[in-house]
Amino acid sequence: MNKIKNILTIAIIGLILQGAQAQSWTPKKATLMTRFSKNVHPDNVLPEYPRPQMVRKDWLNLNGVWQFQPGINADEAFPKGKLARTILVPFPVESALSGVMEHHERLWYRRTFNLPASWKGKEVLLHFGAVDFESEVFINGKSIGSHKGGYDPFSFNITPYLNTDEAQTITVKVYDPTDKGGFPRGKQSLHPGGIMYTSTTGIWQTVWLEPVAKNNIKSIRMVPDIDKSVLNLTVNTNGSQATSVEIKIKDGNKTVKSFTGNANEALSIPVPNEKLWSPSHPFLYNLEISLEKNGQQLDKINSYFGMRKIALADDHGFKKLYLNNKFLFELGPLDQGFWPDGIYTAPTDAAIKNDLSTIKKLGFNMIRKHIKVEPYRWYYWADKMGLLVWQDMPSANSYTSHTPPVDKAEFKSELERMVKTHWNAPSIVMWVIFNESQGQHDTKELVQMVKNLDSSRLVNQASGGSHFGVGDVFDIHSYPPPAAPANNHFQALACGEYGGIGYVVPNHIWKKAPTYIMMKNVKDYTNLYSEFARDLEIFKTNDGLSAAVYTETTDVESELNGLMTYDRAVIKVPVDKIRKSNYDAIHQDLYLTTILPTSEGSGRSWQYTLDKPNAEEWYSENFDASNWKTSLAGFGTHGEKNVKTDWTTHDIWLRQSFSLNDLSKVNRKNLILNIYHDDACTVYINGVKAAELSGANAGYTITSMSEAAQNALHLNGKNIIAIHCHQDGGGQYIDAGISLISNSKQN
């Protein structure tokens, strides 16, 4: 009876405290807010169990209203008593949902909590999902440990520091220099703008407690082997006693395999009549693990796993990405993981689910999680829905000037922790070490380290460069149209970023800024997206492309090239049409027949001049270019791949004569340009403008030819292709050809 009274007393005290906390928190108003922010309540913040692959029955969520105050300096004294203000944990201090919406380099957090009476005699673990960047934790005024790194979970056994009194006090000291530090921070900046966004400081993932026995399950490692139909499992424990594990693999609630083995040993558990996990059938097995000693249960967790395999395989002269021993073209959006109201922290679990379900609804089968690491529950939803994940390592010194040197030791440590934290997620099929050379260092060594840590997944040395011939993927970026890297015969080929189609939805923008290409209406947006999807289908069929990543899932602050608005209120595109385009890119084939070869292989002869032609119609059929020079394409900066003739001035004018024979039966609408331009260029066919292209691309891309130019081609006679290319800065290159698209391979 006394036990019941104690429980009731604690519950009543908790409700009183929650009520008081609820009254002391009011969200701020950001430029945009998601509809999910209305469901954020201070007495029930992110209430879901935070670690779905290692679930225990008993736990206590510490999310909610905490005391808070800005710090002063590194040497300030431990603050006594109540802190000056309040904050809603786990939302970053810069976020509207925190109730603060200010940036502070140093922070103090504090709250009290009561332990349930039923936990008496147990060890109590305190868990932080993530704190950015450096934190020191105090229990009842005593320092119990510190942690560096803004993206990985950490825990402390707080049992020795607990009071005998009911109330316990937790205090957290935080330091985060953001731009002023050389550690991983992804797209965070103290000076947001362009492709850099608002920073996250302090606690930004769930804080929670759980009771365990002294001898308990510390971690598990799961590696499926579909070729042998086994799950390789290691159950790691705290405690020196010899223990065993009782394991049950379940299909729903039905046990399909029971197994007994030793803890802290690698176990191979047969999975009878295995069901494979894939985007089209994301089947997950349930897993129960009981830790036992002499027949007594010491600990029990619930988990899940998927039977799937990711590998490279030889396929018609290319290395390709294979899922479950079959080629699957991987297509997905670049996903930044920012929220207008929560910044790094999604307002609710339903908000995370909504993002991923929208991606799935649009017909994608993959996501590239871009230089951010998410909470466990984000990967849980990817596992459940069947989305392949390319997991980026957050970069150091991203796109900012006057940066400090990269903290190489910290980067290496956080990279290792990222892999070990999430290596059980079936959805993750690739680790991406660097992005666009940002903070890149020791590439070969780090690729090998990750390979040694996790040989069950692929490793991408650097999406968009720099490339050192290591890892499993050769990954280039190309904007706006996609491109395919040249076949090197030992890596899978990927276009790790393309697209970036901008479109403004009034009243749903954070701030307007230029993007790669801005569309005026949904129809033009959809048509261009479909054209790019067609290009992917062509590159997949003809050039061995294995994967592509479209920029991006949502608008992010001043970046307006999302498929959704930043507030997630509007899907900008017609879902059915985008899904159809994506389906064709993933599952259909489009073949190319060369009509006019490019110089990607053997160089072709062009007439050219670096001086502006006197005649306005230098591109016409009858123009006399006999005084122009003649040389082989491609034209560009010496040392660039495929450059056969140096071109280092701002402008170049080109002409090539070619003849077509017996093409009268060809459908002119299926004729396209195959072009590599850096920077902007204009292409003419027989004096008719065929295409006007802005910017630069990173390889040969497919470009539609104007209907007038298609009709101007002499299908049984002599033709002239003429190009003017202008260089603004950086590298430069120009070459082009003409191809014919068809649904079947032409003889």
Image: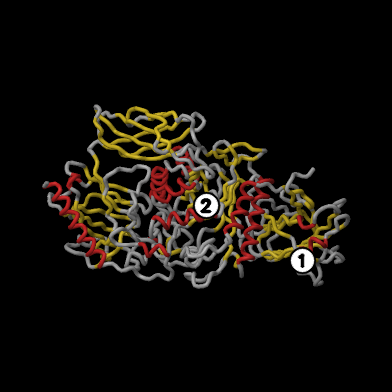
Q: Is residue 524 above or below residue 291?
A: below
The CA distance from mark 1 to mark 2 is 39 Å
Q: Please state the horizontal and vertical placement of residue 182, each as a whole percent of the image.
A: 40, 56
Position in image of residue 145 (x %, y %): 25, 49
Side of 17 relative to 602 (left or right): left
- Residue 615 x/y as whole percent: 82, 72
The residue tagged 2 is 360
Q: Specify the quadrant that holds the C terminus.
A: top right
Q: Residue at coordinates 46% horizontally, 44% vertically from top-left?
A: 446
Q: Secondary structure at mark 1?
A: strand
Residue at the spot 49% in from the left edge and 56% down from the top edge: 335
Q: Nearer the viewer, mark 1 or mark 2?
A: 2
**Which scheme is used to colour this image of the protein?**
secondary structure
Q: Is residue 733 something one can see in this rendering? A: yes
Q: Residues within 10 Å of mark 2 (few under 14, many from 20)?
A: many
Give, as a three-letter code, the residue at label 1: Lys
Q: Which residue is mark 1?
A: 689
